[in-house]
Amino acid sequence: METINTKQVSSFRDWLEPRDSDSGSMPVTPANRLLPRPSASAAAPRISFQMMSLVDARNAGGWERHRHTDHEAILVDAGTYRCRVNGTAIELAAGGLLLVKPGDWHEDQIDAGTRYRALWFRLAGGLLVRPDADPACQAVPRCKARWLADLDRVTASAEAAVEPTRLDAEVAPLVWTFASLLPAEILVPPFAPVAAGFARDLDRAFARIRSGGMRVKALARELGMSQRSLERHCHDALGCGPAQAFARWRLERAAAMLLATDWPVRAVSDSLGFANPFHFSRAFARHHGQPPGRWRAAGGADGGGGKG
């Protein structure tokens, strides 16, 4: 595989210099363009555009393992995008979106025919998601058309080299929209939805016990409330009790892992604490309408399950 030797995302501007095609690196061509942030004296707001990469892979290639210094949002326009984030394999089809946060170790594996856009942005206040977030939860299998239209506008502005303050203004709502697509439990303030405080705390508690047994009394103690209060809050916020909420949470997390990673079904089952793959497949089919393998092959199209 051809590679681009890169250690830091902040050094990607060096790619603007043409590379010898015999050196083993992917050349920078009009099909693989970088749109750097224009220089300006204006102070950057909280969310600031850094640069954008437009990649149209004519041949297989990729970038070696590197550590990020800024956030990178990757949108797949065509083909299949494969990478590893902190050792976790991620695979996204067209319409898929991935967030790579500062501190993440990232390695791209690009197939011929893959097209994607990569938007780098910086948060003056820190991170969009928690440092210990599961990389699989940083991937969104499919994006809504509105999000894609917003990204198209940012791409056009970057190509036109408009003023940085305008790019910042266009990127900010895009980042907030992206945050709304990610699981609440991995977001950090101010992106974490305040109105969903109990649900967020419950999500985080579930994430900590996902591969172990869920005991309502212990869960209530961890959340700092009585068992009766926990039951009431669950019914008010989710329409079900804690045990059913945990069962739903595991099956939704399993769906995200099946779409965003190449883990075998058995590995997903084991990581979420199911008794065995047979039990997992039956529960998954009841919830999503199809067994996990068939559901993954269909790209995540539910088959009319009860969602119970």
Image (cartoon, helix red, strand yellow):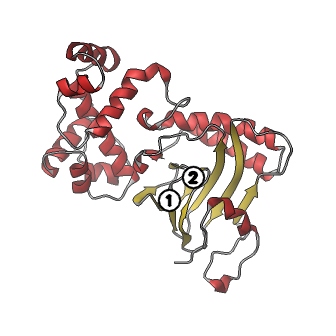
Residue 283, quarter of the rendered image: top left
Task: Pinpoint residue 159: horizontal percent, then vertical percent.
Answer: 78, 53
Q: Is residue 11 above or below residue 181?
A: below
- Badge 2 amino acid: Ile
Specify few, some or many for label 2: CA neighbours under 10 Å numbering under 14, 14-19, or 20 or more: many
Residue at image point 30% right, 48% down: 295
Q: Is residue 87 above or below residue 139?
A: below
Task: Pinpoint residue 174: horizontal percent, then vertical percent.
Answer: 63, 37
Residue tagged by mark 2?
74
Q: Nearer the viewer, residue 56 or 63?
A: 63
Specify few, some or many for label 1: CA neighbours under 10 Å numbering under 14, 14-19, or 20 or more: some
Q: Nearer the viewer, residue 190 or 149?
A: 190
Q: Which mark is residue 105?
A: 1
Residue at image point 31% right, 58% down: 263
Count of marks, rendered view: 2
Residue at image point 27% right, 33% down: 248
Q: Nearer the viewer, residue 150 or 211?
A: 211
Q: Are marks 1 and 2 in contact (CB under 8 Å)?
A: no
Q: Nearer the viewer, residue 307 or 40?
A: 40
Residue at image point 62% right, 54% down: 118
Residue 306 in sight here: no
Mark sitting earlier along the chain (1/2): 2
Residue 276 in sight here: yes
Compared across the picture, whether 277 is left or right of 127 comes to: left
- Measured in 3D between alpha carbons, the distance from the residue under mark 1 to the one under mark 2, in whole angstroms, is 15 Å
Q: Is residue 231 above or below residue 8?
A: above
- Camera-nearest label, 1 or 2: 1
Q: Which mark is residue 85?
A: none
| Element carrying mark 2 | strand
- Badge 1 amino acid: Trp
Task: Pinpoint residue 26: horizontal percent, then vertical percent.
Answer: 63, 75
